[in-house]
Image (tube, helix red, strand yellow):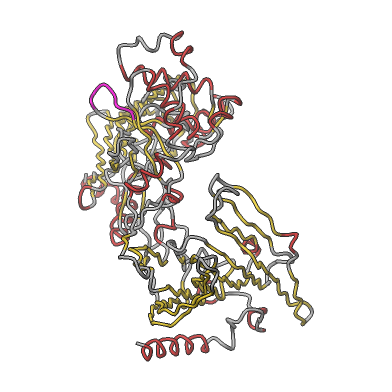
Amino acid sequence: MKKSVFLFLLLALSSVLTFAQEYTYNYGKVTDNELSMKVYKPDSTTSAVTIYKNVIAKYSYKRERFIIEYNYETKIKVLKPGGVKYADIKIPVYDKGKSDIFKESVSKIEAYAYNLENGKVNKTKMDKSYIFEERVTPYYKQIKFSIPAVKEGTVIEYKYLLTSEFPHQIEECVFQQDIPVIYSNYDVTIPQYFDFNVGLKGKEKINVSESVVEQSANGEDEYHQTYSVRFNSRRIFLNVINLPAIKDEPNIWCPDDFRTKVTFELKGTRFPGSDYKPYTSTWEDIDELLKKDEDFGAILNMSNPFKEEMRTANILSMPNKRDKIRAIFQLLKSKISWDGTYRFYGSNVKKALKSGTGSNADINFILMSMLKDAGIESFPVMMSKRDLGRLPNLFPSINKLNTFIVAINDDENSTVYLDGSVTNGDINILPPVLMVEKARIFDQNGKGSWVDLTNIGKNSVTALTSGTITPEGIVNGEQKVSYTGEQAYKFRKLFNEAKDSTSFIEKKELEYGISIKKSSFSEVNSFTSNVKEQFSFTKELSHNDDHIYINPLIFPHLTENQFTKEERKLPVEFDYPYTFKQITTLNIPEGYQVEEIPKPVMIHLDNDGCICTYNVQVLGNTIQVGYTFSLNRIFYNNDEYPALRQLWGTVVNKNTELLVLRKATSQPTKTEEKQTSQL
């Protein structure tokens, strides 16, 4: 074993020495090449590159218990002005306050900036005044520091010591960053008393080696006699070389879900004189912890602060439970507005009641107290927001929970969902960031379960368009649109973000190249699942003396293919499933006939993930268009990307394809005669 480890380290050292002339991986040293580097050749677009990151994690025995000390060292080259942000460092640490005997702390912070100026190296040391501490949650604070004198061309270097009093939790190592990494290693030494599973994640290669090393610890017994214990430890050495950046692709909820990294899960402990103790936590264990938490489980028993208001509004006497749920939620939102933040704990509920504004968690705790008063059963649905990453399957952790919504039992013996952040929706209409595929229903009776929130309602757009084409190349028409579910939420959000209805209409006119004469909207400010829009319009078409060119859809659905890259490493994740349906009827002007017509198409991906049908017909003097696009599945693996890209391209082509009208009195050319015969 020792021989194989030696060979592995020798190979790793050889790889490092290959770069020796360009880079150095010793803290406090920079090379001329590092300082003069203008572009990182493997990725010329990157604004910065991590030259090396070195993490050494070791257990220490202090005050009769084990702790873990992490020594972090990092060197980064800033290549473009956008890379200056990597000089701003944030370190999250667990710290519940003075009353908590277990916490994390950061010390020995040191940082430098190296600049090449007039042929000389100017080294700037960061003063301690640049280090700040900030409370983020009741359980976490953040150590922040900004390295001075950083600009394009700077090499920055920093190190610190993170001390953790949680020996049963080893920090995961995220190798893959938003910028490329030339070299990174994670060196972990674990005493034999702790039995960990090691999990490798991501698509990039991680080199792994293990060995057994001897260690010792000194302690003091109850009689104040010092003693020394020798034991074996498991040393795990992991490293990566020339790791590419994880790119910000369109349609990805959270890139962190797919980064190359290493995770650790404690299976159990075996201390001298004790039997093996399984330690792997479960989500049921986390449920039990939350039941006793004063900022979560205890708040679920709070009394309804709006009892009198509910009675005055006759909400309790409403016969329909869903109407009652809507009325309770609307009453609550008239009392407390959402402050734009998502939280998990309810330590600020009293403050929210007093100020009239609060987080989604504050509002949700109050909502559940009101529902309970109305005899309606509800539960917290715990989750990690899409943009903060999925909940782990193998390593349950309370730290991964960052917010929750409310599950409510309704009349149909089914469950509906609401959240305090909802401002443009209805029951079962959530902001997409909360529509996670895996959320946990918290039940105080110990019956926690899992739920998929990606498809909890019907989402659709149905548009009916009719119009008449004039010989002058103008369409006079009308459109009626019905938006349902998440599409109604999207419409309301855009409508409410506009300065006023006039601004909203002007934006639509600009988008479609139309002039709107009359318009009306219904249910825009209502707490329902539907919105309706109706307007009359005129649109000038491209035309000449003999031809009129028209997109028969008038209002195309997709006009740009967002999937332009030939290859993609990450999967594709859409917001939610939906259906877009449009039926268009156009009257052909007298004296004109159809010369060219778009061909019909019906395409779909395997497993009916996405389907599109498009058909244009000429019936007498009328053009009829039927278009349906259904996104039935929102997750596509990267090996499905080529087919998805091709489908998207075909759909965009059909959405932008033109129909050609020709004056019946004009004489077609031979080419035109051939095209007409093909129809």
Observer able to see residue 473: no
Is residue 410 located in the magenta-colored stretch of the structure? yes
Query: Majority secondary structure of the magenta segment?
Result: loop
83 relative position to 311: left or right? right
Which region of the structure is painted magenta?
408-413
In the rendered image, the vertical position of residue 81 relative to residue 617, given as above or below: below
Residue 42 in the image, given as x and y percentages of width and height: 50, 75
Q: Quadrant of the C terminus?
A: top left
Residue 157 in the image, given as x and y percentages of width and height: 64, 72
Residue 39 in the image, given as x and y percentages of width and height: 59, 74
Observer able to see residue 400: yes
Residue 253 in the image, given as x and y percentages of width and height: 42, 50
When asked about the image quadrant of residue 406, the answer is top left
At x 42% / y 28%, what residue is drawn? 301
Among all residues in the image, which is located at the extreme front? 223
Q: Nearer the viewer, residue 516 or 228?
A: 228
Q: Nearer the viewer, residue 286 or 579?
A: 286
Q: Quadrant of the N terminus?
A: bottom left
At x 55% / y 75%, what residue is drawn? 52
Is residue 345 located in the magenta-colored stretch of the structure? no
In the rendered image, the vertical position of residue 112 relative to residue 633, given as above or below: below
540 relative position to 39: left or right? left
